[in-house]
Amino acid sequence: LVESGIVLAVAALALFMAFTLRQARAARPLLRLRLFGSRLLSGANAVQILMIATMYGFQFLGALYLQRVLGFGELLTGTAFLPAPIVIGVLMLGLSARTIGRFGAYRVLLAGLALLSLSVGFAAAMPALTGLAMSGAREEDAGLASGLFNTTQVVGGSLGLAVLSVLAASRTEGLVAGGAEVV
């Protein structure tokens, strides 16, 4: 399983490199590579990949733990995760803009990342991160920068889930090989 994951990761990297070369040479590229010249936009996308990767991985593995280990059904598992998005939504609507306005996006982002294991951390980090990403784009690139930022979120979630799933499966295989009982 780990070996096939590595092969697929190498293939994905090769395809990404081919896409980048094609975009660099295209007269009308789908993705203007000059966007990555903005440290704010590039940095925000990198942070988002890592942040979303951990969040998606946590949710997936948490759901497996609740169902496979604790015996929760699907409805109870979903209900167990429900408080987090409610807190995130309330905080994003009620406090994020005022907090960013008062303390600045960098400070709110850092505080949010420090508190990421809590819903309040995501509610603080995401709007600050979005604002920083978009402030790093030229006006004529705003739509493309926004699309890139949203795509980065999906890629981060997929990448995080893939990496954590491979690690969890590898660990499980090792435990089973050592005589552990499968739940």
Image (tube, rainbow, N blue to C red):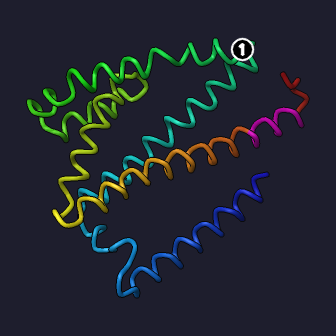
Asked if residue 105 lies in the magenta stretch, the reply is no
Residue 159 against residue 57 in the figure, above or below: below
- Give whichever of 17, 117 is nearer the camera: 17
Residue 134 is situated, as x and y percent measured from the top left of the image, at: 23, 53
Residue 92 is situated, as x and y percent measured from the top left of the image, at: 27, 26
Which image quarter: residue 24? Answer: bottom left
Residue 145 is situated, as x and y percent measured from the top left of the image, at: 30, 59
**Side of 159 where 48 appears, left or right:** left
- Residue at 62 percent across and 32 percent down: it is 60
The residue where tag 1 is placed is: 73
Inspect the image, locate mark 1, and give the three-letter code of the amino acid beneath it.
Gly
- Residue at 34 percent across and 23 percent down: it is 89
Furthest toward the left, the residue is 102
Residue 160 against residue 21 in the figure, above or below: above
Residue 90 against residue 113 in the figure, above or below: above
Q: Main secondary structure of the magenta part?
A: helix
Quarter of the image containing the C terminus? top right
Q: Secondary structure at mark 1?
A: loop
The number of callouts visible is 1
Residue 146 is situated, as x and y percent measured from the top left of the image, at: 31, 54
| Mark 1 crowdedness (10 Å alpha carbons): few <14, some 14-19, many ≥20 | few
- Residue at 43 percent across and 54 percent down: it is 151
Asked if residue 175 lies in the magenta stretch, the reply is yes
Residue 38 against residue 129 in the figure, above or below: below
Which image quarter: residue 179? Answer: top right
**Side of 121 where 4 appears, left or right:** right
Q: Which residues are magenta?
A: 169-177
- Residue at 40 percent across and 87 percent down: it is 25
- Give whichever of 26, 10 is nearer the camera: 26
